[in-house]
Amino acid sequence: MERKHLVVLSGAGISAESGLKTFRDSDGLWENYNVYEVATPEAWDANPSLVLQFYNERRDQVCKASPNKGHTLLALLDDYFDCTIITQNIDDLHERAGSEKVLHLHGEIMNARSSVNETAVYRLKPGAHIHMGDRCEWGSQLRPDVVWFGEAVTQLEPAAQIVAQADIIVIVGTSLNVYPAAGLVQYSQPEAKIYLIDPQDVYVPYLDHRVVKILKKASEGCEILLNLLLKNA
Ligand code: APR
């Protein structure tokens, strides 16, 4: 029998219990940086070494962190469903927990990329930093492979197609503040079952009335979700 398609839409909250801070729980600051001074093309033009330093710190933090129970339980879904994780997170904790199919909407902290050719991506070793003067094969400065505010989300189209095929959608740990990622759930079929796991009652535009909400942290919420899903699988 064909397995059901399940899509997880995850955000910073899934990694909170691994010690990585969310964005909107910290007064507009991201680890004490103003996001607009480190996560925009303008910031890169004005002060690339500050931007590199910021992402080098984030990479160090991600490398020291481990997947938490929420990531591990979501990885178990691969045993029962045709599961894809579509994450806004730049960390690699879903992969390290064992999830097979992970699509990163906002890029990956473990990759560097050319600043002239966005398809030229280089995997970094754990603990590696990108330095001023590190260049791609065409001679341009390497930058983090992350999508900054104001940049196009090139993975949106494939992500929307995956959401459109889902029988089950699980939204976990995202405030649904940042578009276009926040709008992805709108591509779902009318009969798709939608769950949301978050300690806050996050409002899902247009679809809120049919969302099953589990108002818990990811670790506890994913346990409740798995019990619900596996009962009906
Ligand atoms: N488990 C589950 N959810 C949690 C937990 C937890 N332990 N702790 C906090 N949360 C929830 C918060 O209640 C909030 O709804 O996680 C959500 C985090 O929201 P944001 O900080 O806005 O993160 P996210 O939605 O992923 O941000 C989207 O914004 O800054 C940009 O590009 C960045 O990808 C990021 C995007």
Image (cartoon, rainbow, N blue to C red):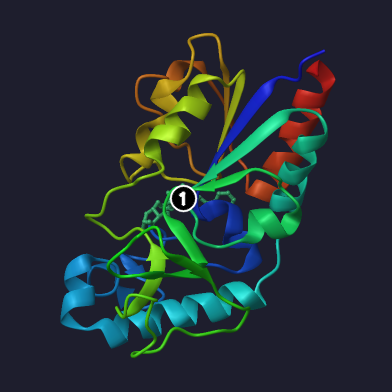
Q: Is mark 1 within 8 Å of ligand 1?
A: yes
Does any portion of residue 117 appear in the rendered image? yes
Question: Which residue is rendered at x = 41% and y = 43% of the image?
Answer: 155
Quadrant of image for the N terminus: top right
Total marks shown come to 1
Q: Is residue 107 left or right of residue 49?
A: right
Look at the picture and state if 118 lies above or below 204: below
Indicate the position of residue 181 as horizontal and vertical percent values.
38, 40
- Res. 21 in view: no
Find the residue positioned furthest to the front. Answer: 138
Please give the residue where the numbered disc 1 appears in the rendered image: 88
Q: Residue at x 43, y 29 (%)?
A: 160
Indicate the secondary structure of the residue bearing disc 1: loop
Query: In the rendered view, does 44 fall on the left or right side of 12?
Result: left
Name the quadrant containing residue 74: top right
- The quarter of the picture where residue 34 lies is bottom left
What x and y, as percent, mark residue 28? 30, 64
Q: Is residue 17 left or right of residue 88?
A: right
Q: Which of the 4 image quadrants contains residue 233?
A: top right
From the viewer's side, name the closer residue of 50 and 128: 128
Q: Nearer the viewer, residue 29 or 83?
A: 83
Whole-percent x, y for residue 121 in the image: 46, 65
- Is residue 104 rendered to the left or right of residue 147? right
**Which residue reaches farthest top?**
191
Q: Amino acid at mark 1?
A: Gln
In the rendered image, residue 186, in percent from the top left (x then y), is placed at 39, 23
The residue at 76%/52% (across/down) is: 98
Residue 70 against residue 124 in the figure, above or below: above
Residue under the point 82% across and 25% down = 230
Q: Nearer the viewer, residue 61 or 119?
A: 119
- Label 1: how many Cα within 10 Å (few below 14, some 14–19, many 20+): many
